[in-house]
Amino acid sequence: MAPGRGYVGNLRPGNHVTPNRPFTLVLSGGGLKGLAHIGVLRALDERGLTPSLVVGSSIGSLIGAAWAAGANTRQMAARALKVRRRDVFQVAGTDVAFRRLLAPALYRREPLEALISSLVGNITFRDLSRRLLINTADLHSGMQVMWGLPGLSDARVADAVAASCALPGIFPPKTIGGRAYVDGAVVENLPVRLAASLGEGPILAINLAATSVLRRADETEGFAATYSRGLEIVMQTQIEGQLRDWKGPPLVLVQPRVDHISMFAFDKTEELMEEGYRATAQTLDELGARLDALSGGMHPTRRLRVVVDEERCVGCGACVVQAPKVFRLAARGKAEVLTPIQNWSPMDGASVLNCPTYAISVRPEDSVVVPEDSAA
């Protein structure tokens, strides 16, 4: 039996999110890594969990739009497995050759837009039976624009998705109503702030921009590899800043382990979908699928032991700057953990990842900490 099958039937009535107990699903960008979102939706389907609102950024907007237009996860998975590089990336040879630095982008817009149209058709946001918001940025004003809001619901869903996928430099901006729009990731790759103000109930956010895996030199050679790696770092730093000290509604953060996969990898589709499923299923099962019973703050929290390897530590103090409540510099000039046992949310490990000598490590000390008010 696949993880989670039949799980909802074992929950007491009222302890899980149903269509009458709304929650918002936020799908981040991340290039082809976004195919993991298909697995996320499958894990939700198996538990009978249907988001009352989906907010998508970049490829998250494409997967969210396909779902909102009525596609099921089986159909989306079958379509994803057929996508090849030529279906998305075709070099804008004429523009690049003749316009050079004035060329709008490295790749042509037509292949991607044809793919988007084949998935969502010619509908507007008003035609959708499921509520969807798509995150973009106005290229000239820098303003974040959420398509699907009142006053922005007459637009074609395919146009909004194309705008949200128009990563600057990679694809040309998308013009809608006479204005140019680009990927909303340049403003907020994981748009949880607006989701908190526009949705109801807790937020389930899927972050695909984690950067914890060290890249080999050959993995950062060439324009595309360097650009995508730089973008990953920017997006993760942005997300850490936005979510640190989160004060909004309960936020469940799922971070599938896709760090090692390139944003432009077309041969990892099955692995991506399976990892999206695994990470989401594991998180929901740890929380007992009781999203509606969670208190404020970020979830899940885990009880971890933090350890500093003194032989590796050079006493630079980066960990103290990142987490002064966790670390200090001892008299001998080495980092020291103030309280070794910590209850950490998914965002509390930045000090570990940012240690330049990899002297800090963590290991599980106990099982997931479930908030007292959600344990009933």
Image (cartoon, rainbow, N blue to C red):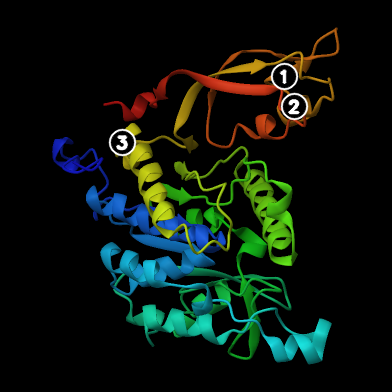
Q: Which residue is mark 1?
A: 327
Find residue 142 and report its image quarter. Answer: bottom right
Q: Which residue is mark 3?
A: 285
- Residue 251, above or below 304: below
Res. 184 in view = yes
Q: Residue at x 72, y 55 (%)?
A: 220
Q: Which residue is mark 2?
A: 319
**Furthest residue toward top:** 331
N-term mark: 2 or 3:
3
Tell which of 150 and 318 is nearer to you.
Answer: 318
What type is the residue that disc 3 sits on?
Answer: Asp
N-term mark: 1 or 2:
2
Q: Secondary structure at mark 3?
A: helix
Q: Secondary structure at mark 1?
A: strand
Q: Please identify the quadrant where the C terminus is shown.
A: top left
Q: Position of residue 53 (x, y in %)?
A: 38, 61
Tell which of 292 and 269 is nearer to you.
Answer: 269
Between the C-alphas of marks 3 and 1, the distance is 32 Å
Tell which of 304 and 96 is nearer to you.
Answer: 96
Q: Residue at x 15, y 39 (%)?
A: 13
- Residue 50, above or below 110: above
Q: Residues within 10 Å of mark 1 (few under 14, many from 20)?
A: many
Q: Position of residue 47 (x, y in %)?
A: 23, 47
Res. 153 in view = no
